[in-house]
Amino acid sequence: MSTITALVGAEIVFGHLLPEGYTPLALQEKDPFNLFKKDKEMRVLNDRPWNMEAQAHLLDDDITPNEFMFIRNNGFIPKNIDVNTWNLTIKGESVKEEKTYSLAALKSKFKQYTYQLTLECGGNGRSEFNPPAKGNQWTIGAISCANWTGIRLRDILKDVGIKDDAIYIGYHSADTHLTGDKSKAPISRGVPISKALQDETILAFKMNGEDIPIAHGYPLRLVAGGWPASASGKWITSISIRNKVHDGAKMKGSSYRVPCKPVAPGTKVKDEDMCIIESMPIKSLITYPKTGALIKQGEKLTIRGHAWAGELEVSEVEYSIDYGSTWTSCNLKKASNRLAWQHFSATVTLPSKGYFEVWARATDSNGKSQPMLLPGWNPKGYLNNACHRIAIKVV
């Protein structure tokens, strides 16, 4: 009942009288904007499972609110969540002592921290690849940077003890496979132990100061910012400490992996020649104004947006109004903490009436810049970090 109440967004009066197996009309209508409290301008890509993204102008907030946060699911959202019985088990061949913690124990036993963390779907920008890549055709809106509050994963690993041969962790979740087969996991990914031990890798209870919304992992989510968001498992019930690279669902084949070396578009790549995506590449997004904006001749144009660089910092953001022939530096702020995005702004002078495009290009702390157009092709259309562009008309 608690899950249904969360999905409906209100207390279900006479809920105790609902016939067994009956789905409330509000859920039958399958309105994701109502179900998940999302803005009506969000774009739905799929409803089995739910996947939806923002548009660039919706992401103008420094801290992403729920209504503009993308949803990426691989299975069905778990039902009948009871926080009073929810447990987390730490297990695996490289754990010294398997332990199970209640939510209450996790919250009381370990110190809590809050970090603003960038989460981006590895397939963000997939729609631009040619030949087309299979999967949800994300444009630019599968990115968010919310505040997450929880406990450091490393503190739990210290409590259970990890063996010297530990090299990876893998998460296990309560969502259901699309086939309904409970023996199959929709997704079970992980990260190297070095990433698991970072300060900012947390098991989160809250997002932006409130309980995590159901679509984003309530009541417990792993958050490993700066890496593909698939590494940040939702609805976590257990974590395995592995003495090998985790081999759960969506860890092999072409899932969240790219060719270790560049390949020609359309090439079939052997599994052994694919590498797991780790730190996400440098990228930026113009969030103001909305593409297609009209301004009057002689009026200054203010632009702003965000830039992020996986495990690295953003060192510079530039804009161009002549299709990349020349570039001008933007004002760039420091991140609120490591692995958060950075905000940029600039005042742009457009020289005449007519059509213009404003392009943004970010450079990371290793000196690597975004490509102006689509980067190298890969079978699943991952890691598109081409420059973002908006259209402007001067009238």
Image (cartoon, rainbow, N blue to C red):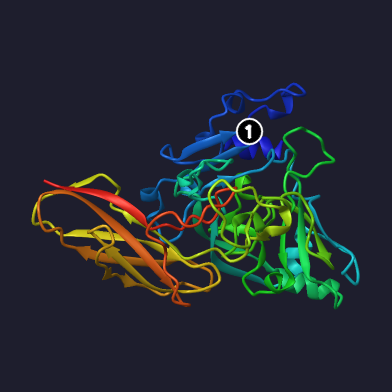
- State the SS at label 1: loop
Q: Is residue 343 left or right of residue 262?
A: left
Residue 303 sits in quarter = bottom left
Tell which of 96 and 126 is nearer to you: 126
- Could you tell me how many numbered marks the image carries? 1
Could you tell me the amino acid type at mark 1? Answer: Arg
Q: Give the x, y percent position of residue 388.
A: 37, 55
Q: Give the x, y percent position of residue 140.
A: 44, 49
Tell which of 372 and 343 is nearer to you: 372
Q: Give the x, y percent position of residue 244.
A: 82, 66
Which residue: 85% across, 75% down?
165
Q: Give the x, y percent position of residue 357.
A: 25, 52
Q: Is residue 144 above or below residue 76?
A: below
- Pick the quarter of the image with the N terminus: top right
Which residue: 72% across, 24% down?
18
Q: Which residue is mark 1?
A: 48
